[in-house]
Image: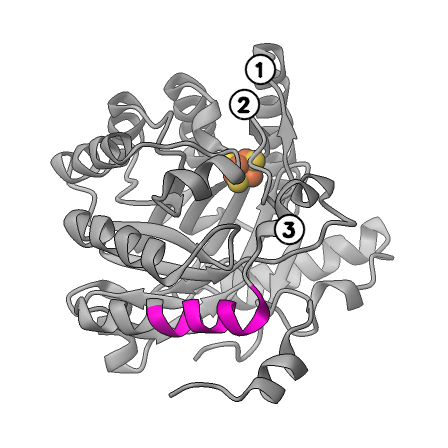
């Protein structure tokens, strides 16, 4: 089904992330300390004791800038930032533990960024094992991390697997070299294959690829080539995101803005990519998200128990998501009735 030109024009406009309601620009950040403590304690009492809490940990450092990036990140090669940042994350976690009325029960952890694999495995080991100390883990807990294919080592995957992680998400975006050059993110197919194969060898049960449509120099032909490579590696899940062009907030995006597809071309790229994904056997589990029929997300959707929290689709019913880190996107997600 093709979308009419007036409709594309009407909705071809920047909008806040759809992952929360109300959306982030409408949030008020005027909680005093006692009010914050009261909300956290009540959320924990109402839901945390039974269902457990999910934790998003933001690791904001990256070694080089991908020019399309709209994330909250800091570009550095300075190893001296690592230690203090991990200490700050643990101090923040301890503040939550002081407020919880009882032993925390962890239902899920997502390491996001930035580039979590900027940190050597020993840092991640220390961070996660310290968080586990004095906490229980729910029987169906989900632990996942975002890995950069260029620097996710076998040791990263093994260390996190030993800690209970069995899901990894790789930022692929596009395999075409011209596109990768324009967005300053060169990652050869062999590196992605190595990272994917390593995760499979270690028993990761869900591997996700992030892909983006609407990037500079993308055409239907480059997208077809990218999807052929994706097909070879057959990740369990695919997030197929729209590129968000906000050069006033992210000036590096200006470097390629003359090469972006037009709005109708971008719409065609999405429709074409979606068609290919369905042809490859992926099912649409929600907005932008596709998964193989055997994947837990597809099964949960079929059984009517798919959930969505601020970080995305999940099978974990936990209604509380706390964010740790300087640029985490939320403090406490107190989400009555957000199940899908
Ligand atoms: S896309 Fe990822 S790796 Fe690249 S700069 Fe942004 S956060 Fe860092």
Dot 1 crowding, Cα within 10 Å, few <14, some 14–19, many 20+: few
Task: Tell me the CA gap for discs 1 and 3.
Answer: 30 Å
Q: What stretch is highlighted in magenta?
A: 262-272
Q: Quadrant of ligand 1?
A: top right
Label 3: which residue?
Answer: 258
In the rendered image, residue 253, in percent from the top left (x then y), is placed at 66, 45
196, 110: nearer the viewer: 196
In the rendered image, residue 240, in percent from the top left (x then y), is placed at 40, 61
Question: Farthest residue toward the left?
Answer: 201
In the picture shown, does residue 219 fall above or below 90?
Answer: below
Between discs 3 and 2, the one toward the N terminus: 2
Between discs 1 and 3, the one toward the N terminus: 1
Label 1: which residue?
Answer: 77
Q: Which colour scheme is used?
A: one colour
Residue at position x 64%, y 80% in the image: 9
Dot 3 crowding, Cα within 10 Å, few <14, some 14–19, many 20+: few
Do we see residue 58 in this rendering? Answer: no
Give the secondary structure at mark 1: loop
Label 2: which residue?
Answer: 63
Q: How many labels does the image show?
A: 3
Task: Tell me the CA gap for discs 3 and 2.
Answer: 26 Å
Between discs 1 and 2, the one toward the N terminus: 2
Residue at position x 67%, y 52% in the image: 331
75, 244: nearer the viewer: 244
Task: Check if residue 268 falls in the magenta segment.
Answer: yes
Task: Tell me the CA gap for discs 1 and 2.
Answer: 5 Å
Give the secondary structure at mark 3: helix
């Amino acid at each position: 089904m093709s979308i009419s030109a007036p409709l594309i024009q009407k909705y071809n406009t920047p909008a806040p992330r759809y992952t929360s309601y109300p959306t982030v620009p409408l949030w008020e950040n005027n909680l005093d300390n006692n009010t914050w403590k009261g909300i956290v304690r009540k959320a924990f009492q109402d839901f945390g004791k039974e269902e457990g809490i999910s934790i998003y940990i933001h690791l904001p450092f990256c070694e080089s800038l991908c020019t399309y990036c709209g994330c909250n990140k800091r570009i550095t090669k300075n190893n001296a930032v690592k230690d203090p940042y991990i200490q700050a994350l643990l101090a923040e976690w301890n503040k939550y533990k002081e407020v919880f009325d009882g032993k925390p029960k962890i239902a899920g952890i997502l390491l996001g960024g930035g580039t979590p694999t900027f940190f050597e495995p020993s840092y991640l080991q220390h961070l996660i094992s310290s968080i586990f100390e004095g906490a229980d883990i729910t029987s169906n807990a989900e632990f996942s991390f975002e890995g950069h294919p260029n620097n996710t080592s076998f040791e990263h995957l093994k260390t996190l697997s030993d800690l209970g992680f069995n899901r990894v998400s790789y930022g692929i975006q596009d395999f075409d070299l011209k596109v990768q050059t324009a967005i300053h993110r060169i990652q050869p197919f062999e590196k992605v294959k190595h990272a994917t194969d390593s995760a499979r060898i270690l028993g990761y049960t869900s591997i996700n690829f992030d892909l983006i449509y609407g990037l500079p120099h993308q055409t239907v032909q480059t997208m077809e080539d990218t999807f052929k490579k994706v097909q070879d590696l057959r990740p369990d899940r695919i997030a197929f995101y729209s590129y968000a062009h906000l050069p006033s907030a992210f000036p590096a995006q200006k470097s390629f803005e003359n090469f972006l597809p037009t709005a109708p071309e971008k719409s065609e790229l999405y429709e074409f990519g979606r068609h290919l994904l369905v042809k490859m056997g992926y099912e649409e589990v929600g907005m932008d998200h596709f998964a193989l029929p055997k994947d837990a997300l597809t099964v949960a959707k079929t059984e009517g128990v798919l959930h969505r929290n601020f970080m995305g689709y999940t099978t974990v019913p936990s209604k509380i998501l706390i964010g740790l880190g300087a640029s985490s996107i939320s403090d406490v997600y107190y989400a009555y009735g957000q199940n899908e």
